[in-house]
Each structure stands twice: as structure tokens, then as C-alpha cells.
Image (cartoon, rainbow, N blue to C red):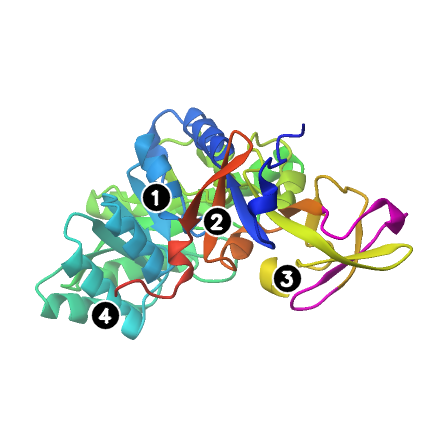
Amino acid sequence: MSWFIIENVQTLDSPALVIYKERVAENIRLLTGMVKSVDQLRPHVKTNKIAEVCKMMMEQGITKFKCATIAEAEMLAMLQAPDVLLAYQPIGPKAHRLLKLAETYPSTHFSCITDDMGSANYLSDLFAANNRILDVYIDLNVGMNRTGIRPLHALQLFEIFQSLKGIKVTGLHAYDGHIRDVDYSKRKQHCDEAFLQVSALADAIKTLTKQELTIVVGGTPTFPIHAHREGVECSPGTFVFWDWGYQNIMPDEPFVFAALVVTRIISIPDADSICTDLGHKSIAAENPFPRVHFLNLPGAEPIGQSEEHLMLRVPDASLFAIGDVLYGVPVHICPTVALYDTAKIIEDKNIVDSWRVTARDRSINI
């Protein structure tokens, strides 16, 4: 029997998100084995959003985490995670929510990123008015062109930040998610070139202030490269569940599929097509077809999708029956997880538990 087959699948309504606990544990083991010390690790929880998964990482000695939302930060604080970096520049109400987190969960150290003078001023005024100092990381744009300031201009920003009373610059943050070369040597070359900008800035700051900043870099694609650097923290996220997209972009990485979607055939409209219940609401739909690859039906060709349906072309529809179960690997697991309020947990080929996808919500308590 293939590893993904669930023996009591008849008890599982579909579509469903299923997590294979042993394989999650294997991915965490692989991750910790790729660094000299777990102190180098600051996993991003945006992929899993599940308290039990984060707890599994904590049980392996991981104490530092990265997140993208206040809900993810609060989920980690509820686990008493010691160190949480909000890798998002909080503005408006989000800044006030971050302050509330710090007040409500004193056992967790919170920090955030910023790349803008106005935002930094706002954070400084807010935290100073409440007799607090917020640690911040300057967000650097090393080619992703999404957020961050170019490293060339960041030294001046750092000097200005030094005068603000309510914040303290403790680190640099750089996400190089644009580097996805299939060829590892090219990926490493581009990663090293991007990191040179970060290390040069860190050296300039150290020369100016004698202060050695923490550097948080990378995601899953560049993690194996950054893992060999001294004095940096790595923040992979997708590794914990893995997905089809990264498996094909980075075949050199050792991680295994640990989260699937389960769907059923609900109609057989003609001789060469079948319809499943895996619609837009059940699989991340930002990518073109195929958005999912079925482990037990590798030749299926997606030909149409709507909110609750996914149509597949097959060579011979007579080989299938309504109710047949398909096991799919999402091309992009992170937004797929966020479509489900719970995940069914598989151990020894059986459903044994249900875990809430806690941080899919925009807020938990704060």
C-alpha cells in the first residue's frame, strides 16, 4: 500500500486537508540536521498556521519563529514561544495590536520589520507612550521587489532610527524569495550575490556603532545555502509540509510531502472526464493548471474548475466509480492550508486526530 493511502478514509468527508504527522516530524528532523545549531533556525509559520505543528518544532529545540500576521504571532505566544518576529511592517491598527500582544504575552519577545521613516516614527511614538521599546529589523530589498529598502540606502535609515526612543534596531531582515533557480549552482550564485549586500551593510553598521546586528534571511529555496553562513538565522516555512512546486524547483532538497488534499469523484459526465469535489475553495487557485497533482492518478489533466468542482480528463472514465478517492499534492501548500479550518491527522495510515488551523483567522483574541 502506498504511504499516502488512509485505511479509514471512508470516515473522512471531502474535500479535506490531511497531515501525515510522521512525515512532518521527518521534515523537522531533516531541517535541524542541516544546521550546526538549532539557534540558526527561525522557521516561518505562514505555511502551517497550526499550533500543534509549531509545538512539534519547539519540542525539537526551536525557540525562534517568524510570522506574517498578528494571529500567527498570537498563536505562537499562546504556546509560549520565546521569540517571535513579525515579518510584516505593522501600520495603523496592526501596530496597536502588536503593542497589545506585547502587553498580553510578556513571556514572548516580539519584534517586527520596518523599511520606512514614517512607520518607524509611528511605532516609536506608540511604544514610547506606553513605556516600551520595540525591537525592529530593517527590512531589505535584495531583489524580491516587494517590500524593503535597498541596502545601499539603509545605512542612513539606520542612523535616523537610532534617535527614536520607542524602537531599537536589533537586526536586518532580507527575504530572497525571487531566487528559485532549479540549478543549485545558479541558485547559490544568485543567493550569494544578494547576501553580499546584506553582509556589507551589517559590516558598515558594525564599523559605525560597534553593534553586531542579527541577520534573518531567506526562505525554503535558499535555506540550504544560508544554513552554512556564520551569524545568520534562516527562516524556511514550506519545508514542514513541502509541495509539488518546490519539489520540482528544488529537487536537491530532502523534504517529503507531509500534507495532501483528499477529494472524491462526484460525477462521470462522459467517456474521458471525471468531476471531483476539489473546487477553488479547496485548493490554492493562484497558479495556472495544474494546481494539484494526484499521487494515485498521475496522468489526470485538469480541464476546468469552479467553486466546488474540478474537472479532470482521463484516458478511460469507465475505470472509475463515483466515490473513488484521490490524494492530491498541491502545487502551493501555503495558501491551500489557509482554506481549511481543520486538518485531519494521519498516523499509521489512519485518521487519529483533528487539528485546528488556528491562524487562518485574521484574529484570535487580539
Nearer the camera: disc 2 or disc 4: 2
Q: Is residue 45 left or right of residue 287?
A: left
**Mark 1–mark 2 contact, CB under 8 Å?**
no
Identify residue for label 1: 215
For label 2, count other residues whose C-alpha is less than 10 Å away and answer few (under 14), some (14-19) or many (20+): many
- State which tag comes first along the sequence, 3 or 4: 4
Callout 4 amino acid: His
Identify residue for label 3: 285
Please name the predominant secondary structure of the magenta segment in the image.
Answer: loop
- Disc tally is 4
Which element type, helix, strand or loop, lies under badge 2? strand
Callout 3 amino acid: Ala
Callout 2 amino acid: Ala
- Find residue 253 and report its image quarter: top right
Identify residue for label 4: 96
**Residue occupying the point 64% across, 64% down:** 280
Q: Quadrant of the N terminus?
A: top right
| Residue 74, visible in the rendered structure | yes
Nearer the camera: disc 1 or disc 2: 2
| Residue 143, visible in the rendered structure | no
Give the x, y percent position of residue 32.
Answer: 41, 28
Residue 307 magenta-highlighted: yes
Tell me the magenta residue range: 305-324
- Find residue 65 and report its image quarter: top left
For label 1, count other residues whose C-alpha is less than 10 Å away and answer few (under 14), some (14-19) or many (20+): many
- State which tag comes first along the sequence, 4 or 1: 4
